[in-house]
Amino acid sequence: MLNGKHIVLGVSGGIAAYKCAHLVRLLVKEGAQVKVVMTKAATQFVTSQTLSVLSKHEVNTDFFDAGHNWINHVHLAEWADFMIMAPLTANTLSKMASGTCDNLLLAVYLSARCPVIVAPAMDLEMYRHGSTRQNLERLMQYGNYIIPAENGELASGLTGEGRMAEPETIVQYIKEQFILKLPLHGKTILVNAGPTYEAIDPVRFIGNRSSGKMGIAIAEALVHQGASVILVLGPSTEPVSVKGINLRRVESGEEMYEACVSVYDSVDAAICTAAVADYKPVSMAPEKIKKKDETLQIELIKTRDILFELGKRKHQQCLVGFALETHNLEAYAKQKLGNKNLDFIVANHALEKGAGFGADTNKVTIIDKHNNLVNFELKTKQDVAADIVAYLIKYMKWA
Ligand code: CTP
């Protein structure tokens, strides 16, 4: 359920820090990527090596790493979808409440714009103390989330409130408070992306310059909003790094058609970004075509229009297409919207600087079947993907 989520785990120096190893394992098993930041005191209770091996990421304790490189706390904070402070000691709690910034962990905390969840752990009297109560109150006022300490045996030998919540409780809390509330939780969405290769002979094909970047960015943005994503990807060399995407690789338009149709009835939405070849060779030569005459003719036949076929079979699904145009953008996009029975279409200008195939940026216009039209600025494909996903959520009233 935490597939692809980025979590910064802040560990401060209390005996409960030993439980962090288990917490990291649980989070990683749930599909999250975890980066651990520790205070120096925390390293006396659990080693950074242990947490680094378990998290598969470098663990940072200082503003500089072993090679004297500066650790950018702002980047770390921006990377995070969630920050968990576990265990949170009385000392770090007090610093968080007062805005003290004398270590990397506190700098990351102060830079974080994501939800911050804290799991305090301290001895009975410390946990009961008026200043602790006040500091926790203040953290709540700042918008942080508190997982109260549990009752039980404490390191001092006393029994009472102060034990850090168990790692299982922390994971469950995140799921219930955040993941289950994501707008696309429980939705399954099909995305197709990339080019298709239509074989001429065993070694040659007809293809196009599509990189698949836009569709991959959309698949990732959907996962971040809680969706289960099936990504049918043509021959693209782009990495698909976010966990939680059910990736199905295909090569030809026909394979892409089969893969899309086989899951279409069970999805809530389909977003077709693929640059499917419009024509393919009538037949594939069984052996490599030898060089002979001055000219060579290859007879082509239309491929199946996947989006058109999905439009015909549409029940309750939201169907979204793309339109890549060099001219008459709006008119052609509207034609495709109607002909293919779409809910909305994302039109982009192939010749505009920074837009279209291969680029890392895109500039799109969304037109829906109720004739609403929204022009977006030139943005990174990740930001364009977030806009498209936000449009989908609003259009379907899923939030
Ligand atoms: N599409 C598809 N199958 C095809 C061709 C296109 O599913 N064989 C989909 C694309 O994934 C896109 C939309 O149809 O979502 C529009 O694709 P585009 O290439 O812009 O238009 P075409 O319909 O192919 O028409 P034309 O090439 O004449 O502009």
Image: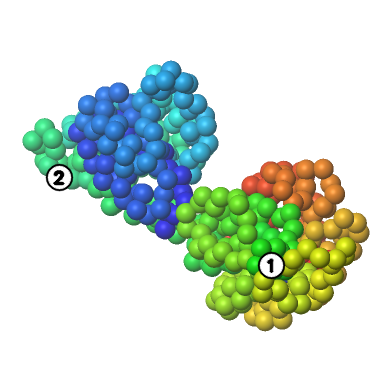
- The image's colour scheme reads rainbow
Q: Where on the picture, by quarter, is residue 201? A: bottom right
Report the residue at 41% width, 53% height from top.
Answer: 31
Does residue 155 sit above or below 371 in this rendering?
above
Q: Earlier in the sequence, mark 1 or mark 2?
A: 2
Q: Left or right: 386 with respect to 139? A: right
Report the residue at 39% width, 33% height from top.
Answer: 58
Q: Left or right: 193 with respect to 34? A: right
Q: Nearer the viewer, mark 1 or mark 2?
A: 1
Q: Where is residue 80 drawn, in percent x and y? A: 48, 40
Q: How many other residues sit within 10 Å of disc 1, few (<14), some (14-19) or many (≥20)?
A: few
Q: Where is residue 187 drawn, in percent x and y? A: 53, 67
Viewer-nearest residue: 310 or 94: 310
Report the amino acid beneath label 1.
Answer: Lys
Residue 177 in view: no
* SS state under label 2: strand
* SS state under label 1: loop
Q: Left or right: 149 with respect to 340? A: left
Q: Where on the picture, by quarter, is residue 160? A: top left
Q: Where is residue 335 drawn, in percent x and y? A: 85, 69
Q: Quadrant of the N terminus?
A: bottom left
Q: Left or right: 285 with respect to 40? A: right
Q: Where is residue 49 drawn, in percent x and y? A: 29, 33
- The extreme front residue here reads 292
Viewer-nearest residue: 75 or 174: 75
- The extreme left residue here reads 157
Residue 349 in view: yes
User: Quadrant holding ligand 1?
Assistant: bottom right
Report the residue at 85% width, 49% height from top.
Answer: 351
Q: Which residue is mark 1?
A: 288
Q: Which residue is mark 2?
A: 152
Q: CA distance from mark 1 to mark 2?
A: 74 Å
